[in-house]
Amino acid sequence: GEDVEQSLFLSVREGDSSVINCTYTDSSSTYLYWYKQEPGAGLQLLTYIFSNMDMKQDQRLTVLLNKKDKHLSLRIADTQTGDSAIYFCAEGGQTGANNLFFGTGTRLTVIP
Amino acid sequence: GAGVSQTPSNKVTEKGKYVELRCDPISGHTALYWYRQSLGQGPEFLIYFQGTGAADDSGLPNDRFFAVRPEGSVSTLKIQRTERGDSAVYLCASSPTRENTGELFFGEGSRLTVL
């Protein structure tokens, strides 16, 4: 079955870059995703990348995909205290099957 | 409403009782999903509806769990003979179509505690 793994914790200083890593097992995934979960709020899609791309940039966010190694990363530039949250990597999105498989989440703490 | 609405936000029940959790998706979204999130874990897929029918219920852990969506909008997740291991946050999500980029719109969840 699908397995998505992430490290549990990351601490960075405000203004530094954060890099959150993820490995996955299902090579047939069409899309890979990063979701953000803030305390008391629902998960929110941050960004996604199509499996035939190796990089996607969206303002402060950069997603890198190494399909050969099944490795996905999310880089947040100029990390702010408002970025403190849990970040989930997810795979899925095959046509007609939208059930996503999530990692355990990485808790990002931004130190002022 | 503007977003996915779930009720109740918190439910405390005793072992062996029956529980219903409700999800009101974003208007017009045809796909609806239930996930379960245990403490310190990522969301775990339970069931997916396309319209009124359950397109994929492979994530339901056992036959104590059942979900319906009779009119293709509101969905109810039903748990019979609850056990302490059922304690978790139950998340509902919806999306506009069956085939999309996988953006799911999540509610804030229903936190179930089984004593």
Image: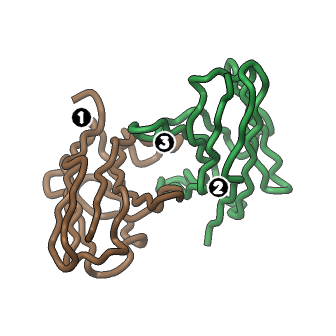
Residue A63 higher or lower than B89, as above or below: above
Question: What chain is tagged by disc 1?
Answer: B
Residue A62 higher or lower than A37, as above or below: above
Q: Disc 1 marks which amino acid? A: Ser
Residue at image point 30% right, 40% down: B29
Q: Quadrant of the C terminus of chain B?
A: bottom left
Residue in front for this viewpoint, A21 or B59? A21
Residue at image point 70% right, 23% down: A79
Answer few, some or many: residues within 10 Å of disc 3's Cα (few below 14, many 20 plus, some between 14 and 19).
Answer: some
Chain (brown):
B
Task: Tell me how far mark 3 sits from mark 1, CA to CA.
Answer: 17 Å
Callout 2–callout 3 Cβ contact below 8 Å? no
**Same chain, marks 3 and 1?**
yes
Is residue A72 at least partly visible in the picture? yes
- Location of mark 2 (residue): A29
Residue in front for this viewpoint, B106 or B114? B114
- Location of mark 3 (residue): B100
Q: Earlier in the sequence, mark 3 or mark 1?
A: 1
Answer few, some or many: residues within 10 Å of disc 2's Cα (few below 14, many 20 plus, some between 14 and 19).
Answer: some
